[in-house]
Image (tube, helix red, strand yellow):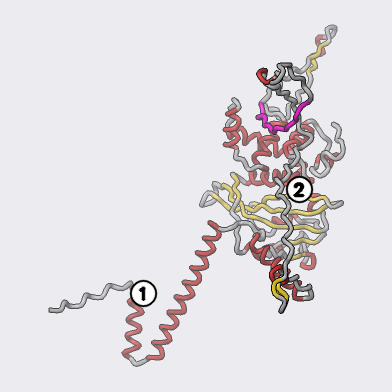
Amino acid sequence: MTEPPAPPAKLPVDIEDVRLKLAQLAAEGRIADLIELVVQLLVGQRDTNTALSVRLANALRELYGRKSQKVSSEELSLMLAALGDAEQKVGEPAPAPSNEAAATAPGDGPVPQPPDPPKPPRGRGGRAPLPRDLPREERVIQVPEAERACEHCGETKQCIGYRTTEVLEFVPAQFRIIEEKREKLACPACPEEGVVTAASEKVMDRGRPGPGLLAHILVHKYHDSTPLYRQTQQYDRSGVSLSPSTLGDWAAFGVDVLTPVADRIFERVVGAFYLHVDDTGLRVLDRDHPNGVKRGHVWSFAARVDDGTKLVAFRYAPDWSSKRPAVMLAGFCGYMQGDGYAGYDAMEDEDGAPVVPDERRLGCGMHIRAKFEKAGDLFAGSDKGAERLARAYTAFGSCQLNGVDPLAWATDVIGKLQAGWPLSRLDELLPDAWGKSPATDA
């Protein structure tokens, strides 16, 4: 006895509607319309699947793939190989025959060939020399007492020299308390005239950090990307307890001190003849935003100024409107290279004229890759914090471009600025000039 067929599974509403429509067309004998409908449904499904596949591939690439826009070694090898093939085709002489091919002459049989020359011994690779300006400590290591006597006659061996080796050691940084004793003067004959007290040399009136500690916090945070809570842990291991909020206040103060330097760097960069411009999104905490986080933008400007010195400057904008770069580029008279940001077309000055006309705007081919390789966002706690981040990146990025030690630079510059360094001599403190000419205190 055969079992009755199982009832068909219940179809989703949209699929059931399609089935009914196809059945209707078949019942009416409209076969051509039925076929056309099926084809359109298949095309739509194919396009949807293709779009989803592209989105999935992009998501996987962004999650696991290479984020940099640099050319990979594999791509570079293919390019060089193709270049070599092209040079060979346009007239390069054919390569010499190999030993095996040359070893056999037509009709003469094998011809003895000299053996290949021996390969030179592989060297160990020289070590990079240690910097000469590092402090050195001489440590004499004596031969143990049991080995100082001659094995044959028993006489005491005499020192005939030393075999010198170098050991690179690391001495952990140490905190130091500087106790200021400010002199007080009073006239014994005129006590009513009051007492004169020497001014403090502190760089922060309501705080205790010296210029070296401020510089250390800034370099670790903005140059080495070390969060403040990790710096707190490092300092705690040295026996000094500082909360992340305290370090945050000190970092904000330190960047504010360096603001004149960052602003001057920006002036020199946008005054260049040829300027690279780009922006990147930055998540910024905002209590007024529905999601609590908004998207600001950090604009980067890079140029060679004056005699070829390389400088870089950053500016923060709380949104992506064209008025932000229009203000930043006001007065710029050179050529600007950047991506296809639509806001460049809308940048106008107070008279309605374009800030950077089309004839002075150059495209950037590398941004074609950026359409496929997206960079991840940075993060800031507020608009003010993002502005400080841009200033810090301006200062330390220019240090990096000019080979300047950011810690030594920031320590010196913070101290000089807080001691009343004249703004008319601000250029002497910029990274490209600092250290090249002796800058004396004002």
**Magenta stretch in the rendered image:** 161-174
Residue drawn at (49%, 75%) of the image: 47
Q: Nearer the viewer, residue 193 or 315?
A: 315
Q: In which quarter of the view is residue 137 placed?
A: top right
Residue 164, magenta (yes or no): yes
Answer yes or no: is residue 207 visible: no
Q: Earlier in the sequence, mark 2 or mark 1?
A: 1
Q: Tell whether 165 sits left or right of 46.
A: right
Mark 1: which secondary structure? helix
Q: Quadrant of residue 423?
A: top right
Residue 34, placed above or below residue 223: below
Residue 401's label in the rendered image is 2
Residue denoted by label 1: 14
Placement of 287 over or under 441, stated as above or below: below
For the point 44% across and 75% down, which residue is it?
Answer: 45
What kind of residue is marked 2?
Answer: Leu
Residue 300: x and y in percent read 71, 53
Residue 247 seen in this snapshot? yes
**Left or right of 421 on screen, residue 291:** left
Q: Main secondary structure of the magenta part?
A: loop
Of 417 and 276, which appears nearest the observer? Answer: 276
Looking at the picture, which amino acid does disc 1 mark?
Asp
Which residue: 68% across, 24% down? 176
Q: Residue 403: x and y, percent?
A: 77, 44
Q: Position of residue 231 (x, y in %)?
A: 60, 35
Mark 1: give few (<14), some (14-19) or many (20+) Cα within 10 Å. Answer: few
| Residue 354, quarter of picture | bottom right
Q: Quadrant of the N terminus?
A: bottom left
Q: Which mark is residue 52?
A: none
In terms of depth relative to the viewer, which is nearer, 286 or 418? 418
